[in-house]
Image (tube, rainbow, N blue to C red):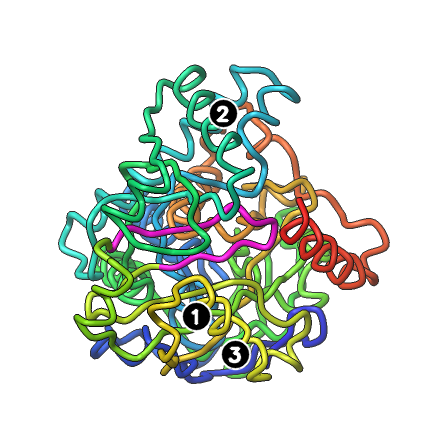
Amino acid sequence: MYDPLKHQSPGQNQAYPESYWANNSGSLNSCDGPIDGDLDVDVAIIGGGYTGLSCALHLARQHNIKPLLLEANRTAWGCSGRNAGFILKSTGRKPYAKMISQWGKPTAQAIYNEVCEGVETVNHLIAEGIDCDAQSKGYLRVAHKPSMVSGLIAQSKMLADEFGYQTEILTSEQLKQDYFDSLDAHGAIRFNDGYGINPLKLANGYQKLAQQAGARIHTGSPVTSWSTTSNHGQQRQQLHTPNGTVTAKKVVIATNGYTPKGFHWSVDNRTLPVLSQIIVTEPLTDTQLSAANFLTDNVVMDTRALKYYFRKLPDNRLLFGGRGAISGKDADNPYFAKRLLNVLRTSFPAFKNVNYQYSWSGWISIALDDLPHICQADDHQNVFYSMGYCGNGVSFAVQAGKRLAQRVAGIEMPNNPLFSRELPLFPFAKFRRVGQWGYFHYGKLVDRYF
């Protein structure tokens, strides 16, 4: 499997993985095909996932800038087409309580508002007619141990006190009666505005809107090298693809977890790509669902350090996800899918004979400070990027793309850490995966004994 820390290219025109999404999204909208010859444009966007598509859409719609988007493989070939499809009011991995203690209430409020605006941006775009199999509203954060319940209650109180956001506190009995019966569910808080979608259909909808607004989207066009020229004192970026060179006044890097090794100095060694693994079961029978009292299609995530997440899909399959392999060469090892299946069966004894039909993985992008950053990358205001969603990018990446479009157009950004700071460099970057390995083992101990 392509590994961003090992490979200098994600390939060209690669097929989607054999995922549930790829097999259940119907025919996808066509693009403009690979670059064929040299082109000169005002703005080039690298990456055809949520961030790049949103940036293209908002540049064309709101700023009358018709960008050219370059995607190495197919639209949403990366994590935008491989994730679990959770729309959440979340960003990064940094809790709001820590933001308040570190930066104060006004900064935390500004970041919270940005996250909420991201969900609303997604909702408005879907309301334009994107068919993405949106399910009912509701996100359950479930305590996997009795000792975790108090932390959830404290989180619920903090959200109400600091942001006026109300969550519902559920006992283990309420979970069992109204949602599902799991051995690893001892209480929960329920957010009323999270929900599940088909992520590949969602990206396809964004692509259609961007094309209708005037953006050009070229798939099968990896940027194999990048150079800078100067003409009468003005810098131009030259993006070299197998079939032609794109010369642009401004470039947006929207590759996130799929950014190749050594791609550009502004993003090198600033994220840690981490594999998330997903399995989807065979369709569950009414008898199986009844035995687990599985009544909900709300999206679910637990309180483990190494989190598991799941949801019931429209055709009564169960999607179940968690951490995957550390390196790309091990990504297709069936051990990781089987491990998820064993956890699923242990958590839901009623599903002890259930098997999975689909298994795949995708790279998410972890920032050192656990926050995404939407940045101007150079002093010439020619290069911009957004990265580091930490597994929470389905809604926030769309907001980030919208903000990138504003940055490209010269609009001043809010003064908070999402915009005012570049992604921090990882110290001892060559050993990032050693640290990841250590954290995985630490997480196992925490989840088992604390």
- Which residue position is annotated with label 2? 154
Which amino acid, by three-letter code, is at mark 2? Ala
Identity of the residue drawn at 76% across and 47% down: 425
Residue 101 falls in which quadrant of the image?
top right
Looking at marks 3 and 1 on the same chain, the residue that comes earlier in the sequence is marked by 3
Secondary structure of the residue carrying numbered label 3: helix
Q: x%, y% of residue 446?
A: 68, 49
State yes or no: residue 237 in magenta: no
Residue 278 falls in which quadrant of the image?
bottom left
Establish if 297 lies above or below 93: below
Q: Is residue 212 visible?
A: yes
Residue 338, which numbered label?
Answer: 3
User: Which class describes the residues within 10 Å of circle 3: few (<14), some (14-19), or many (20+)?
Assistant: some
Residue stretch in magenta: 297-310
Looking at marks 3 and 2 on the same chain, the residue that comes earlier in the sequence is marked by 2
Which amino acid, by three-letter code, is at mark 1? Arg
* Distance between mark 3 and mark 2 Cα atoms: 35 Å
Looking at marks 2 and 1 on the same chain, the residue that comes earlier in the sequence is marked by 2
In this view, which residue lies farthest toward the left?
Answer: 129
